[in-house]
Amino acid sequence: MHKLLSKIDSADSLSSFSLGQLNELADEIRDVLCNLLSDRTAHFASNLGVVELCLALHSVFDFRRDRLIWDTGHQIYPHKLVTGRYHKFKTMRTKGGLMGYPNPHESQYDIFMTGHAGSSVSTMLGLRSGDDLTGEGDRYAVAVIGDGAFPSGIVYEALNNAGGMKKKLLIVLNDNRMSICPRVGGMADYLDRLRTNPFYTGLKTEIAKALTKVPLLGDPTERLLAQLREGIKAGLHGGMLFEDLGIRYIGPIDGHNIAVVRKYLQMVKTQEGPVLLHVVTEKGHGFQPAAEDPVFFHTPPAFENNNGKAIHKKKGSSKVFTDFASEAIRAQMQRSDQVTVMTAAMCQGNKLESIRDEFPDRFFDTGICESHAVAFAAGQAKAGLRPIVDIYSTFMQRSYDQVFQEVALQNLPVVFMMDRAGLTGPDGPTHHGVFDIGYMRLFPNMVVMAPGDAHDMTQMVDLAIQHSSPCSLRYPKASAGELPGNRTPVKLGKAEVLHWGQDGTILACGSLVTEALAASVLLRGEGLDVGVVNARFAKPIDREIIHRAIGDTGFLVTVEESMLMGGFGSAVLEVASEDGLASENIRRLGIPDQFVEHGDRDELLADLGLDAAGIARACRMVAPASNADHKQQHVVR
Ligand SMILES: Cc1ncc(C[n+]2csc(CCOP(=O)(O)OP(=O)(O)O)c2C)c(N)n1
């Protein structure tokens, strides 16, 4: 039991804590974070890094009424701990338990459910302006954003707007020099230069000289801020980019010193107009292994904290789809100098680190800038290259307009590798990649593929690189084996029959082919011979196999780890409708029109009837009248 944390029901009590108590609380929070990681994967280093900042914020503002958004939201654990969720903390990222991201259903302290980076400044500016218009303008508005999220294009749209609107708004830039991997790009260099500002490095004499030139008149807080600004201007290149945009820049300050952060927060509270407070923190602070290797400890597998040392638990070694995707990309890059690869700050998640090292000239990390990455790839394709854009399905949504205009409309040969397509498990609704079949197949020229296993992956990447139009591949966060039997080569628009059944057909898309095979085995044990077809393509779709399945077997069940609306099954129904096929014996399995919560992927699949048992159940239900006895038998189960 943690003495202080266990008694905090609401964050407003922090305003009465002494500095000593706040520091004690920081220790307790770090202890809770380490305990959580002893039995599950969770975001870790980012949370360790914001403990003091979080406590300072909650002790200066009252966020029952004031507004606070943690950008992205992966660093929200300390905030959850001091906003009444300590006693539920052990349920973090489990089904029915706390979400690993902000969740307004859990607490009034979480305003938006988020998980995608970069939108906090925009939404906070909207809240600010909304509060002003509704007569609630006394509420403070605070967005905390990491230096990894900061280069997102949307942030500049928001800064531009904020500078113009001159609304009272506090943007806390949490600068730990890291995205998941080390941050990249010109803004990273700019922030590095700001850190050499004497306020931070302690070279106070030049500043002191500059300060003496500022007249000692007016309100003391205003005067101090004016001095800070003048000091910066005189000094030494700091923050002028923001100042010129109309946003007051203050910092950098030490984000692990609660007293210092509190002092600055109190000060900026009195300011009108937008302010950017540059706070320097260390990712992984307070747990040495995480501070030393923040990339690994961003979301590490479970480990024991043995007196400050991380003792890792043994983990399974089966290969996942991402491994095969990365191997296929490497093979293409080895084969041709024209092949390039882009990631939007997910080098580690995409398992591209060794490719980055092997092909530094053809590997591009754009930072968390998915729309830019896609338009950038389009430029390269126009210049004659074969770019592969490796972005999680959920984050590809950020670049939807570029997929449309810069790629599909120009019919450029860009390859989209949509990793984590399907249910991503404990991350939950912000991260499930369940919309891509629908949004990709809408575009003329776009090929949409879903490998059933490692064999498909290699051949599909090859096909995509040879193809002269845009292609997309979707694959899940799951282990990938080899489907059984003699495999057929991947051919554009052709499905693969794994087993032809007399009684019915399961047409499974990508990640769920193995579940479909297991369902078929279950049904065979009950006397139903249901075939399994590996669909491979959602577009162009294999019309012939749909005709055969409906014409020659009793029923057709489509299976996809994706939204039903507009998805793979919908594409099958479109074929049935266009070609005048009977559709009464077609059933679609997938995700209904709802957001899916977080939880273990297998649990979620079972709940949605997308595991072997659920697929078999659906087949029994749709089996034709000749199997009526059989159907009856199983309905009552
Ligand atoms: C649009 C989008 N792309 C990618 C990600 C994946 N992602 C989650 S956290 C993160 C790094 C964020 O870095 P930063 O904002 O500096 O926070 P830190 O973890 O360093 O505290 C990334 C790339 C995301 N959440 N949203």
Image: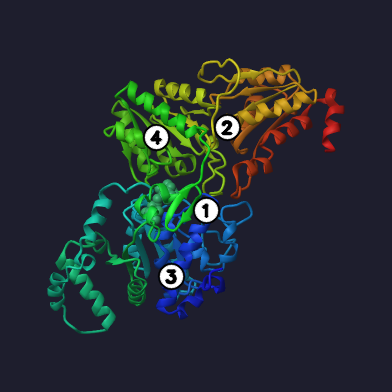
Task: Name the amino acid, label 3.
Answer: Leu
Residue at image mark 1: 38
Q: CA distance from mark 2 to mark 1?
A: 30 Å
**Residue annotated with mark 4:** 389
| First reached walking from the N terminus: tag 3 or tag 4 | 3
- SS under mark 1: loop
Q: CA distance from mark 3 to mark 1?
A: 24 Å
- Within 10 Å of disc 4 (Cα), the crowding (few <14, some 14-19, many 20+) is many
Residue 372 spot, x, y in % from top left: 35, 42
The residue to which callout 3 is attached is 55
Mark 1 residue's CB less than 8 Å from ligand 1: no
The image quarter in which residue 509 lies: top right
Q: Earlier in the sequence, mark 3 or mark 1?
A: 1
Which-is-in-front pick, marks 1 and 4?
1
Residue 454 x/y as whole percent:
51, 26
- Which residue lies at the image location 75% right of the left edge and 34% below the top edge? 617
Identify which amino acid the numbered label 2 is placed on.
Ser
Q: Residue sitting at 24 percent across and 62 percent down?
A: 239
Describe residue 240's horizontal placement relative to residue 128 as left or right. left
In the picture of the structure, the residue carrying the numbered disc 2 is 511
Query: Where's residue 369, x and y in %?
Result: 37, 45
| Earlier residue among tags 2 and 1 | 1
